[in-house]
Image (cartoon, helix red, strand yellow):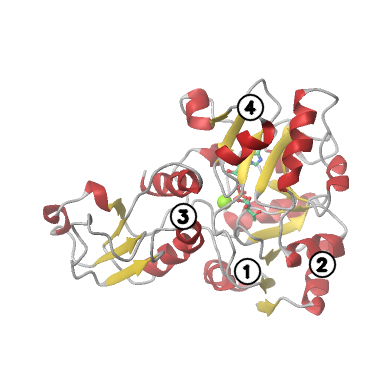
Amino acid sequence: MILEANEDNIQKAAKLIQSGEIVSFPTETVYGLGGNALNENAVKKIFELKQRPSNNPLIVHVSDFSEISTVAEIPSPGKARDRLFKLSSFWPGPLTIILKKDPSVSNLISANLDTIGIRIPNHPFALALIKSAKCPIVAPSANPSNSLSPTSAAHVHDAFGDKLKMVIDGGNCKYGLESTVVNILEDDVVIYRPGAITKEEIEKCLDEKVKVLDEANGGKNKPSPGLLEKHYSPKTKLLFSENCNFDDLEKYEKIGRIRFKTFNDDDVFQNYPFILDISLSDKGNFEEIARNLFAALHSADNHDLDLILIDSCKEEGLGAAIMNRLKRAIQ
Ligand code: TXA
Ligand code: MG
């Protein structure tokens, strides 16, 4: 059931979470599927609902820095501790920091790793929910494993229907892409998943170079399966427009187009009569592209198309996160 985000419904959602139920709530990145991190049955339910492999760990959401020590170790004085305190300036916000897990936390959450991802979301309803439930909340994106992430309450409802007791509707998500996941524990700082907080911003904040997972280990020894496999995929075949020519298009009947900007003189397909034609941004603004990306893919999926042609962009700043999601959707 989709319910408006008001004080009453947040209290109801908090009660459901306390009793071990799962509710979906908005964050500034994407909608989450939330459950009490201290209740193993709730954690199990999330894995079942999402059909998520048990070796893919969940992020724990707290509402304040002081709550971190209930689920993770604050590193002792040294590099990791300095980095944690510096990066906490992005909280509340779209950043997940990998820390050593507190032994009391269920191994289901961490998928048997000795680390845990922590995030303080920057959304009034998400924060109010965590505070009212009085427990840390595990929340993966509210989509079946590997499919498109939800950026509206309707996306969540379409995916889970009555299997979910409650979806709190907070409108469309501000960023539209999942949080940046960063490991600060090793010699090198490594971005496991690019997101709204960019590599450039993290480097500036830490005053050191950071690596991105692919660069860091050539894609091997991935720390968690959710990070590199095919993921975020629409049901419809998706291709980058730059990799296609007119002959390729002849193989398909119903073709949709997702543009990064409305008019692009370099686009050979600018005037092609696509059945569905969506511009994510008038002028190719990365924030707008990110915000509208998953909604456009959801919409294209609902049009019974044979192919979606999508633009690509430079992998710089937020462009790195946009291309990370698209490359993994196309893989
Ligand atoms: O923006 C977000 O982070 C959203 C909202 C709801 O907060 N949540 C989200 O969760 O995207 P999820 O489960 O869909 O993605 C979490 C990612 C997965 O790729 C997982 O592999 C990685 O974070 N992850 C979680 N804990 C980890 C750990 N201890 N080590 C390495 N990767 C981890
Ligand atoms: Mg996800």
From the viewer's perspective, is residue 231 above or below residue 305? above
Give how far apart the Cα atoms at labels 4 and 2 are: 40 Å
Closer to the eye: label 2 or 3: 3
Mark 2: amino acid:
Ala
Q: Which residue is mark 2?
A: 14
**Quadrant in the picture for the N terminus:** bottom right
Separation of marks 1 and 2 at Cα, in angstroms: 18 Å
The residue tagged 3 is 286
First in sequence: mark 3 vs mark 4:
4
> At 66% from the left edge and 61% from the top edge, which residue is drawn?
27
Q: Earlier in the sequence, mark 1 or mark 3?
A: 1
Does residue 319 appear to the left or right of 75 in the view shown? left
Q: Nearer the viewer, residue 305 or 199?
A: 199
Residue 127, image x and y in percent? 78, 61
Give the labeled residue for mark 4.
208
Q: Nearer the viewer, residue 122 or 13?
A: 122
